[in-house]
Image: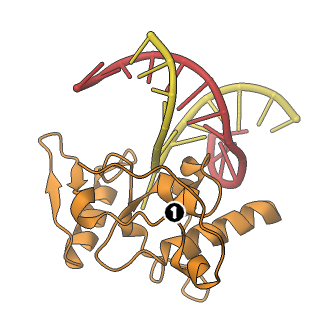
Chain colours: A orange, B yellow, C red
Amino acid sequence: MARTDEAEAFYYAVYNAIQEIPYGKVTSYGHIARLIGTPQRPRQVGVCLKHLPTDLSLPHHNANVPWQRVINSKGIISPRGHPSGAAHQAAALRAEGVTVTQSNMGEFMINFSEYGWFPKQLPSEEAEGLEPHVFTDEEDN
DNA sequence: TCATTGACTAAAC
DNA sequence: GGTTTAGCCAATG
């Protein structure tokens, strides 16, 4: 778990942002980082998911945070050294209607132009009437 | 304590 | 097209 209050707040922001990804859509680690105001820390977003609790009594856990909807900027499910985890993630996405293709190298790929979710700010912040934060547009293919 | 690692990314070769 | 580099910083060893 987080060692400092600041880190704990970061975890909280990451999980909250991920919970706003719509069903059947995907986004990238980098975009989550930008949405929560720390565009320099996409790696830490990955760390947060790695440590996503299984304890259902906590406010955020792997049953209410759609971790499977976060992939890398190339549109590929990060293998994180062990392919079985990526396969599990691919299955979870397919279960919600996302088409996941597999390259000849065994990478699980998702088409951002079809399933990508890249808002300029979190819907929850938009509802609060905060000023939009300007980003360069995410490229599709 | 100190050093290394890594569910990442954009920019620079 | 591709590879390398730099930045990030909590977690891990």
Q: Determine which residue is flagged by label 1.
A: A49
Going 55% across and 48% down the picture, which residue do you hit? A43
Image location (x, y in percent) of residue A108? 22, 53
Horizontal side of residue A107 vs B12, given as left or right:
left
Residue A1 in view, yes or no = no
Residue A59 in view, yes or no = yes
Image location (x, y in percent) of residue A94? 20, 72
Residue that lies at the very extreme toward the left in this rendered image: A104
Q: Amino acid at mark 1?
A: Leu
For the image, the number of numbered tags is 1
Query: Please, is residue A65 above or below residue A111 in the view?
Result: below
Horizontal side of residue C10 vs A44, given as left or right:
right
Image location (x, y in percent) of residue A138? 39, 52
Image location (x, y in percent) of residue A88? 28, 65
Q: Give A129 or B1, whichever is nearer the viewer.
A: A129
Residue that lies at the very extreme toward the bottom in this rendered image: A57
Query: Please, is residue A106 above or below residue A116 in the view?
Result: above
Query: Please, is residue A78 above or below residue A92 in the view?
Result: above
Going 32% across and 45% down the picture, which residue do you hit? A74
The quarter of the picture where the N terminus of chain A appears is: bottom right
Mark 1: secondary structure: helix
